[in-house]
Amino acid sequence: MVQITGFTTRDVRFPTSLDKTGSDAMNAAGDYSAAYCILSTDSEFQGHGMTFTIGRGNEIVCAAISLVAPLIEGKDLDELTADWGKTWRYLVSDSQLRWIGPEKGVIHLALGAVVNALWDLWAKTLGKPVWRIVADMTPEEFVRCIDFRYITDAITPEEALSMLKEIEAGKQDRIKEAEASQAVPAYTTSAGWLGYSEEKLKKLLEESVAQGYKHFKLKVGANVEDDKRRLRIAREAIGYDKGNILMVDANQVWSVPEAITWMNELAEFKPWFIEEPTSPDDILGHAAIRKALSNTPHGAIGVATGEMCQNRVVFKQLLQAGALTVLQADACRVGGVNEVLAILLLARKFNVPIVPHSGGVGLPEYTQHLSTIDYVVVSGKKSVLEYVDHLHEHFVHPSSVKDGYYVTPMEPGYSVEMKPESMDQFAYPGEEGKSWWRSQEARVILDGPRVV
Ligand SMILES: [Mg+2]
């Protein structure tokens, strides 16, 4: 029996704004950050969970983690995991904390870190990676992980059970494929950040093609003529007829009519989808954009969103409204593994592929598990998963890609445990003499403009 005896939070920030890594039409200069929840126990095991942010405000998420984590202090891990759906409901039921959500915003980001830390801890005690725990569950056990409140008008537990049973037959073969790292094809955004020069874009795309990638994503939305120029360079590098797929991402900069007009301008480059064309809360707006772009003179352009969708309720409505071509749930913006499992079931029900959001520190480490679960247990269909080749060196078990596929994680846990020396080096505000943020170099960010 393992008892949770306490927790700590860590505020870790990488100065990615210095070289414009992660830059897009909405986020000109993000510092990729992690708000950590580290659970301590009366055993040799610790649980590590984090939520991704892009810098300022990370301390607010850490403060929220400090309010949620006490709910599991002193509890036995076995009891918490015996009926996961009930535990998840318990964790969103502190009505005073619920008031500052409910189930959205900072309090939900914090919940994601705490729930994921519990899964990491559980996986470590079982000696399995998280994806494998779920793959080894019966359909009944899977369904028991989920709080179905607010989604039974779209999917009931009984329906979920029969969907999971339907594809049970091939599961053992798919587990073998996962073990051979053939479950999750990767795509790359490493070339496509808006702040990169055209030379850098061309060079990085050509490198990605040589590495065997088939899917490429570029940021758009700052200037339409620049977008055309960059997409032309991209198509020259990846071709139109080599099976290479182009995607574009606007990070919420447009109103609904602007999105439709702008994407018609870019239709000649034949993107598979436009990601985050408008506000993540605008369900009917996404539906209108998808409808308008379903029939351009150059073919259909799909609509994708999810990285800032706050919970399973918003995903349910996006699916019910026919607003999505691709669903991009985030591993820690929604309330951790359990809520993602609910979203995977919803996506399967509406026959929409899942491509979890992975453009951030620690996210590929998480999402490799989620995409593997989707393929092995829920949809039985291979999708793709974003891989951004930054900052993996800070993790104890970094995610990686080989021959165009994610290398399936086999180590026990949820893969987001960061090296202690990296945590100290990039702690914010950090210790004098230890943290980069106390150095002279950091002044350019700390004293720089907030809105650029
Ligand atoms: Mg995006």
Image: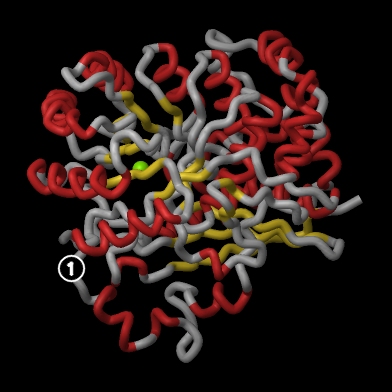
Q: Identify the residue at horizontal 43%, vertical 75% (top origin).
A: 429
Coordinates of residue 146 in the picture (x, y in percent)? 67, 26
Q: Quadrant of residue 101?
A: top left
Mark yes or no: residue 451 visible.
yes
Q: Which quarter of the image is occupied by the C terminus?
A: bottom left
Mark yes or no: residue 67 visible.
no
Q: Which residue is mark 1?
A: 449
Q: Amino acid at mark 1?
A: Pro
Coordinates of residue 21 in the picture (x, y in percent)? 33, 62
Left or right side of 336 for 221: left
Name the foreground residue: 433 vs 219.
219
Q: Residue 14, relative to residue 217: is it above or below?
A: below
Q: Identify the residue at horizontal 45%, vertical 63% (top origin).
A: 390
Q: Identify the residue at horizontal 79%, vertical 20% (top origin).
A: 140
| Rendering quadrant holding ligand 1 | top left
Q: Residue 192, relative to residue 382: is it above or below?
A: below
Q: Residue furthest bottom?
A: 433
Q: Residue 288, relative to residue 431: is it above or below?
A: above
Q: Secondary structure at mark 1?
A: loop
Left or right side of 197 for 114: right
Q: How is the image coloured?
A: secondary structure
Q: Residue 244, relative to residue 298: is it above or below?
A: below
Q: Identify the residue at horizontal 19%, vertical 59% (top origin).
A: 198
Name the foreground residue: 109 vs 376.
376
Callout 1 environment at 10 Å: few (<14), some (14 to 19), or many (20+)? few
Coordinates of residue 95 in the picture (x, y in percent)? 55, 34
Coordinates of residue 131 in the picture (x, y in percent)? 71, 41
